[in-house]
């Protein structure tokens, strides 16, 4: 079965696809969590160049980013479930 021309190239008209945006968001959250973990280790090792405040802010940023991505995922799963339960 052949696919429609528009299905082969979802980025052609609207710019970045949802999958690309979600992938970038996950990468950013991952980087943020890695940075927060690094800062945590540095504080635990008593590195004088890393402040506790900077570490706490990084941890909060990574937590907020993770919660945002989690909420988007939950909404996406919920929408998918609704579409699958629709009667045709």
Image: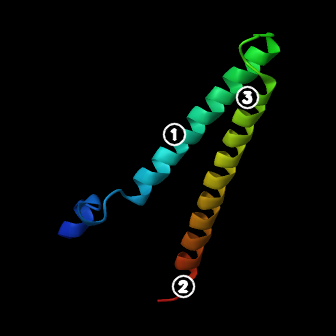
Are discs 3 and 1 less than 8 Å apart at CB?
Answer: no
Q: Quadrant of residue 73?
A: bottom right
Which residue is at 49% across, 52% downward? 22
Q: Secondary structure at mark 2?
A: loop
* 16 left or right of 65 in image: left
Q: Secondary structure at mark 3?
A: helix
Which of disc 3 and disc 2 is earlier in sequence?
3
* 82 left or right of 40 in image: left
Q: What's the distance in space between the residues labelled 2 and 3, CA to CA?
A: 48 Å
Which of disc 1 and disc 2 is earlier in sequence?
1
Crowd class of label 1 (few under 14; some 14 to 19; many from 20; radius 10 Å) = few
Which residue is at 73% across, 18% downward? 50
Q: Which residue is mark 1?
A: 27
Which residue is at 73% across, 36% downward? 57
Residue 66 vertical position relative to residue 35 in the rendered view, above or below = below
Q: What's the distance in space between the residues labelled 2 and 1, CA to CA?
A: 33 Å
Q: What's the distance in space between the residues labelled 3 and 1, CA to CA?
A: 21 Å
Where residue 86 is drawn, which disc sits there?
A: 2
Are discs 2 and 3 less than 8 Å apart at CB?
Answer: no
Of residue 47 and residue 85, the one placed in the foreground of this image is 47
Residue 15 vertical position relative to residue 56 in the rendered view, above or below = below
* 52 left or right of 69 in image: right
Q: Which residue is mark 3?
A: 54
Residue 20 vertical position relative to residue 86 in the rendered view, above or below = above
- Depth check, mark 2 against mark 1: the one in front is 1
């Amino acid at each position: 079965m052949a696919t429609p021309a528009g299905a082969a190239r979802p980025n052609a008209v609207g710019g970045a696809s949802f999958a690309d945006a979600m992938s970038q968001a996950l990468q950013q959250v991952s980087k943020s969590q890695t940075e927060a973990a690094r800062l945590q280790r540095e504080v635990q090792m008593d590195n004088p160049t890393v402040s506790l405040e900077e570490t706490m802010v990084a941890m909060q940023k990574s937590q907020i980013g993770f919660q945002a991505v989690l909420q988007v995922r939950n909404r996406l799963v919920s929408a998918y479930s609704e579409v699958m339960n629709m009667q045709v």
